[in-house]
Image (spheres, rainbow, N blue to C red):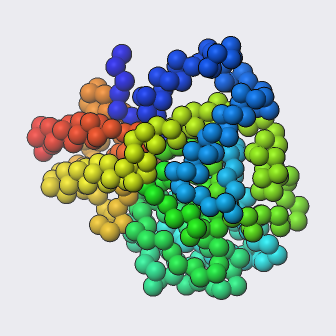
Amino acid sequence: MARVFNFSAGPAMLPEEVLLQAQEELPDWRGSGLCVAEMSHRGQEFVSIAEQAEADLRELLSVPDDYRVLFLQGGASSQFAMVPMNLLRGSDRAAYLNTGSWSKKAIAEAERYCTVEIAASTEEARFTRAPTQDELTLDPEAAYVHYTPNETIEGVEFPYIPETGDTPLAADMSSILLSRPTEVTRYGVIYAGAQKNLGPAGLTVVIVREDLIGQPLAGTPTMFDYATHVQSDSMYNTPPTYAWYLAGLVFRWIKRQGGLESMAVTNARKAEALYAAIDASGFYANPVELACRSRMNVPFTLADPELDRTFLTKAEATGLVALKGHRSVGGMRASIYNAMPEEGVRALIAFMQEFERKYR
């Protein structure tokens, strides 16, 4: 069976080139006689894989020497706890921007450890936009400011990086990291679940500034202390070795595509084409303000919700899968991360236009 175009928000599709390389290396990685999944994480073979992956990630993002890169487990959801545990550093409050489903979850978790001050919220607007810089109310005494640059469920993206002065900025970049260049030095902590643009589910990348490491909240579990993983090169316990390996292959693939500048151009072109098709139609609609539309996750609704099931069934029959919107929002959602080729977006647009012609 031919591969389909997978528009899932995550786990998302991986580059076919990466899958084929992993397939070739599966039973015997480079003459070692071992599958990577069988290797000791402390053995020379896997250590070389891990070191190469970190080097490539640092090169892609231009990560400065005073930032540490960690390859962890637990997904972004564990970081909802690890960020306050490590960044409060004696303070009893932190500032959060409430812009969608994932920021709400981060807020709920942080409230277990400190007083959360909502620096801005767009909930009254049903999370259809990001707040402007002028709308942010930032307490200079807050230990850090946290935000979600791209809300995958609502399809809302910040068109700017919040200015927070000397207060460290923490960001959940699960759905945008490696989709474009990132000014790492603007952040105290960046974290991302891998299952969007970085690799398969099971791996979480954390990039943290050194001065924010080593002062965890009293009672923080050993595994939730960033210092634990810094001191052990992310190998305090057995890491998700195969996911780490696959992420490394994805990093190399991105470099072959021309790096993050090239990915940004391609991703913008894909998003612009899809939004243009939606906007040109009275049959489809996107609720997000123009300036805040996500380049990664494109939600859209049909004029007649009764046609949703038919749309999904027929789309799947043509090889366009995982287009159902999140249950909290409804409608459709096309996630068009790095590995989604432009051919897939063109195929979706053609299907949407033909479906409208038949069912309008």
* Res 116 seen here: no
Position of residue 302 relative to residue 90, above or below, is above
The outermost residue toward the right is: 219
Identify the residue at image location x=61%, y=20%.
30
Answer left or right for 177 relative to 159.
right
Identify the residue at image location x=68%, y=13%.
33
Identify the residue at image location x=43%, y=55%.
180
Instruction: Return the x and y of residue 290 as percentages of the image width and height.
Output: 29, 66
Position of residue 129 relative to residue 71, above or below, is below
Quadrant holding the N terminus: top left
* Res 132 seen here: yes
Answer left or right for 86 relative to 179.
right
Quadrant holding the C terminus: top left
Say how many tags the image has.
0
Q: Nearer the viewer, residue 143 or 51?
A: 51
Instruction: Return the x and y of residue 39 as percentages of the image width and height.
Output: 73, 24
Instruction: Return the x and y of residue 56 as percentages of the image width and height.
Output: 57, 44
Identify the residue at image location x=31%, y=28%.
319
Position of residue 301 relative to residue 195, above or below, is below
Q: Nearer the viewer, residue 316 or 16?
A: 16
Q: Nearer the viewer, residue 217 or 308?
A: 217
Instruction: Return the x and y of residue 98 as percentages of the image width and height.
Output: 53, 70
